Amino acid sequence: MNTNDYAIRLERSEDYRAVESLVRESFGNVYRPGCSEHYVIHVLRDDPAFIRELDFVMEQDGRLIGQNMFTQTIIEADDGRVIPVLTMGPISITPELKHRGYGKTLLDYSLKKAEGLGYGAVLFEGNIGFYGKCGFTYAREFGIRYHDLPESADDSFFLCKELIQGYLDGITGVYQTPQGYYVDDSDVAAFDKDFPPK
Ligand SMILES: CC(C)(COP(=O)(O)OP(=O)(O)OC[C@H]1O[C@@H](n2cnc3c(N)ncnc32)[C@H](O)[C@@H]1OP(=O)(O)O)[C@@H](O)C(=O)NCCC(=O)NCCS
């Protein structure tokens, strides 16, 4: 990766379809046959919890090669407080440019912007192999539990990074995934019909 062969900017409405295609190509058949993430972003953009100021695309030679986005959510603290936090994703890099450093670059940039807007922490489900390079660690180390997960279950997918150091000090509680991330398979299938067959 060349450090000056890309640009990162906010997503515009005219990018929507191309970004959905990018996400579909990037996630398609990676975690399961097909994917739902292109429909998730389609729905999320209209969600009140979605943060337009943190909805980024990465461009190279006038073509979209990556995207990342954030949504507001909460931790329901055990002491009754409601702690506002961010969740992130989907994040993706176009298949032919994966593993060249673009994902980390986009992620680091996005996190800096989120920090600049004053958000305190980011939590989501992901692979520590990638996100660990950008300062994420297991959310359990902060005393935060994943909603609806039995205590004995593996929670190593559930990651956290403080953007304000100490933001989660003295807090234990349960993280809630924003409702916008839950989509029906039938809606995904209907939406997917408008894309070229894979
Ligand atoms: C995950 C994704 C965004 C990473 O972007 P990328 O440009 O391929 O990653 P980078 O090249 O910046 O990798 C940064 C580091 O993370 C590691 N890494 C990248 N993807 C990884 C993965 N899936 N699992 C484990 N480690 C990974 C790399 O080894 C690299 O470390 P290194 O520099 O020491 O070699 C990209 O591969 C992608 O779009 N994947 C499909 C969609 C997806 O899975 N999104 C995330 C869902 S949680």
Image (cartoon, rainbow, N blue to C red):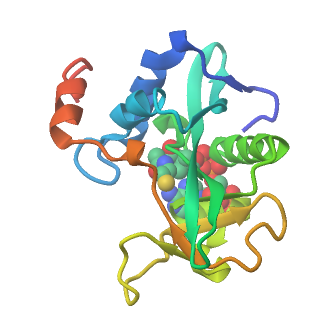
* Displayed quadrant of residue 84: bottom right
Give the answer, above or below, for where 186 lies relative to 80: above
- Camera-nearest residue between 18 and 82: 82
Name the residue located 75 percent from the left edge and 57 percent from the top edge. Answer: 120
Residue 122 at what x, y percent from top left?
A: 65, 57
The N terminus: image quadrant: top right
Relative to 17, is 112 on the left or the right? Answer: right
Q: Residue furthest front?
A: 80
Residue 146 at what x, y percent from top left?
A: 46, 71
Any part of residue 128 in sight: no
- Camera-nearest residue between 120 and 91: 120
- Camera-nearest residue between 41 and 164: 164
Name the residue located 58 percent from the left edge and 17 percent from the top edge. Answer: 63
Q: Residue furthest bottom?
A: 152
The number of numbered badges drawn on the structure is: 0
* Displayed quadrant of residue 161: bottom right
Residue 34 at what x, y percent from top left?
A: 25, 41
Give the answer, above or below, for where 73 lies relative to 139: above
* Displayed quadrant of residue 144: bottom right
Residue 140 at what x, y percent from top left?
A: 58, 80
Any part of residue 115 in sight: yes
The C terminus: image quadrant: top left
Relative to 80, is 22 on the left or the right? Answer: left
Name the residue located 56 percent from the left edge and 52 percent from the top edge. Answer: 73
Give the answer, above or below, for where 118 lies relative to 58: below
Name the residue located 24 percent from the left edge and 25 percent from the top edge. Answer: 191
